Image (tube, rainbow, N blue to C red):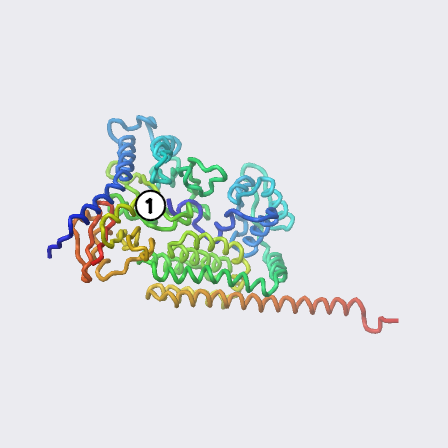
Amino acid sequence: MPQATGRADATRAVVFSPLDGAGRAELVEQRLTDAIVSGVLRDGERLPSESELARSLGVAVVTAREALVALRNKGLVHTRRGRDGGSFVTHDRDASMRMVDERVRALSRSELRDLSLLYAAIAGTAAEVAADRASEDDLASLVEIDARADLTTPGGARRAVGRFQLEIAAVSQSPRLVHEELRMQAEAGPLLWLCLREQDSRDRSRTARLEVIQAIREVQPERARRATTQHIASAVEWLIDEKVRLEQASLVEAHEASAAATPEGGRP
Amino acid sequence: MTITVDVDAEHIAQRIASTIDPVFTMIDGWRDAFERELEGPFAGALTGEGEQTASTLDPVVAALVSPELERDDALITGAGFVAAPGFLADAPWHLAWWLSGSNTFGAGPDPRLRRLEAVSDPDSEQFRDYTTLEWWRVPARTGTRHLTGPYVDYLCTDDYTVTITTPVRVGGEMAGLVGTDLYVARLEQVLLPVIREAGHPCTLVNASGRIVASTDARRATGALLRIDGLAEALTPLRDAVTATDAASLPGGEAVVPCGDTSLALVLEA
C-alpha cells in the first residue's frame, strides 16, 4: 500500500531508516545531527520516542538513548517530561552552522568528491532510466513536486531536492535504485546540499530540476542523466570551495591567536 | 474494422485473467462482507450498534485478511481496508493494512503477519493525504476496481508492487476501500509460463502500456512498451470501461484485453 504510511517526506523519512555498520550510537547521533542542522527536522519538532527510534533505525533501545543524550549535550534537542513530553528539536542557527562547518572540515576533498561521484552514479542512472520509463502520471507528479518546492529556506529547498530525486528513482521502476537513493540521501545529502544555504544555489537547483523534467518529457535519457550529474558536480564544487574558505578562515584565526600570544617586542 | 485474433491469443488472455481472478474474487468478498456489516439487515453484526469506529472495525479487517495473507502459496503480500476521510467516528483518516510474513519491510529478523504502521494524524509532518494517490483516486472516480502499478512502493514496503483496490459503498457513498498488494516478481513467475504458451512473441502490459511480463527477454518489466497506436488502444482500459474487443495496431500488432483485469496482451506482428 503505497505512499500513505508516514514516509511522505522522503528527506525526512531517510533520517529514520535502518542503519548499517559499527559504532551505531555515533551513527544515530550523526544522522540526527545532520538532519537537525540542515533543517530537515524542524525547530520544535518532536522526535520519535526512544523505542520508536530504536525500531525504525534497527538499533537497540539503549543505543537510541545514548544518541539522544549526546544530542541533548550538544544542545540540539531538549527533553520535556509528562504526558506531552518527549525530545524536541532545538534549532540554533549559529550552533548549527558551526557543527556543519566542523563536519565539512573533517572530510578530505577526495572523500567529498568520492561521495558525490557515487551519488551521481546512482542519481544519474535513475534519471536516465526514468526518462525512458516515465508515464504521463509520473511526469505530472514530478511537476507537482517542483511546483510545491519552497525555495525560500535551505530546509525547504533540501526537502524539494530529496523528494524529487526519490521520485525520479521510483519512476525508474528500480527498487534497488530507490533503496540506494534513500541511503545516499542520508549519507551524502546533508553535505552535498549545503550549497542550498544560498539563494543562488536554490535557484540553480530549480533550473536543474526543470531541465530534468524537460528531458523526461521529451524522452531524452542522456540529457536527463547529464542535467542530474552536472547538478551534483556543481554542488560538490561549491562544497569544496566552502571547505577551502573554512580552512583559510581557521588559518587566519590561528595566526591571529599566535600573534596575540607573542606580542611584538615580547621576546626577551 | 474487424480484427481476427487467433483463438490462442484470446485463450491466453483469458488464462491471464483467470490467474488474477481469484485475487479479485477475494477482495470483492471482503468488500461484500464490509458492505453487509455497514448497511442493511446485518449491519453491526460484528461491530455492534452505533457509529463505526476504527477500534471496532480493525478486528473485522484482521479476521478477513489474515487467513489469506498466511496461506502458503499466497500471491498477495499485504491487504486491508482504508477508510474514507471522516467515515469513522474516532479516526478521521484510517488505514487498517496488514503485511504478510513474506513482506520483510521493517519486520526485523523474524518476519510474520503484522499491521502496517501508518501516520493518520493530519497535523503530523509525515501525514500523507491518501485520497490523492492512484490506488484511491481512480477507484473513487470510476466507482470500480483498479489495478495500480507495477510501481516501486517506496513509501511503504520498498518493493516492486501491484496494488488492486475496490471501493466499499454505504448508502451510495464511498466509505473506504479494500485492497491488496502483490509483488511483481511473484506475479512474473506465475504469468510467464502462461504467456509463453502463445508460441509467439507477446507482452503483457498494464493500462498505461507498462510491461508486466514478456516472452521477449529484452522487454524489461517496468519499461513502457513503445509501439505506435498502443496508447490509444489502451485508453478504454484506463477509463475502466469493460473492453473485451481486440484491436490491431498500425504495425500489425494485436492488443487483446485480459478480461476485466485492465491488463492487455500485445501480440507482435
Q: Quadrant of the C terminus of chain A?
A: bottom right
Q: Dot 1: few (<14), some (14–19), or many (≥20) neighbours within 10 Å? A: few
What is the quadrant of residue B177 in the picture?
top left
Tell me the chain of label 1: B
Q: Could you tell me the amino acid type at mark 1?
A: Gln
Q: At 23% from the left edge and 53% from the top edge, which residue is drawn? A: B200
Q: Which residue is mark 1?
A: B189
Q: Is residue A39 left or right of B63 when viewed as pictured? A: right
Q: Is residue A85 above or below residue B218?
A: above
What is the quadrant of residue A136 in the picture?
bottom left
Q: Secondary structure at mark 1?
A: helix
Q: Is residue B227 above or below residue B116?
A: below
Q: Please tell me which residue lies in front, A95 or A235.
A: A235
Q: Position of residue A123 (x, y in %)?
A: 45, 60
Q: Is residue A246 visible?
A: yes
Q: Position of residue A217 (x, y in %)?
A: 33, 64
Q: Given the current orientation, which residue lies at the most extreme front position?
A: B199
Number of callouts: 1
Q: Is residue B131 above or below residue A160?
A: above
Q: Please tell me which residue lies in front, A230 or A40.
A: A230
Q: At 35% from the left edge and 51% from the top edge, which residue is drawn? A: B151
Q: Given the current orientation, which residue lies at the most extreme right position?
A: A268
Q: Please tell me which residue lies in front, B204 or B23.
A: B204
What is the quadrant of residue B209 in the picture?
bottom left
Q: Position of residue A249 (x, y in %)?
A: 66, 68
Q: At 44% from the left edge and 36% from the top edge, which residue is drawn? A: B112
Q: Is residue A262 above or below residue A133?
A: below
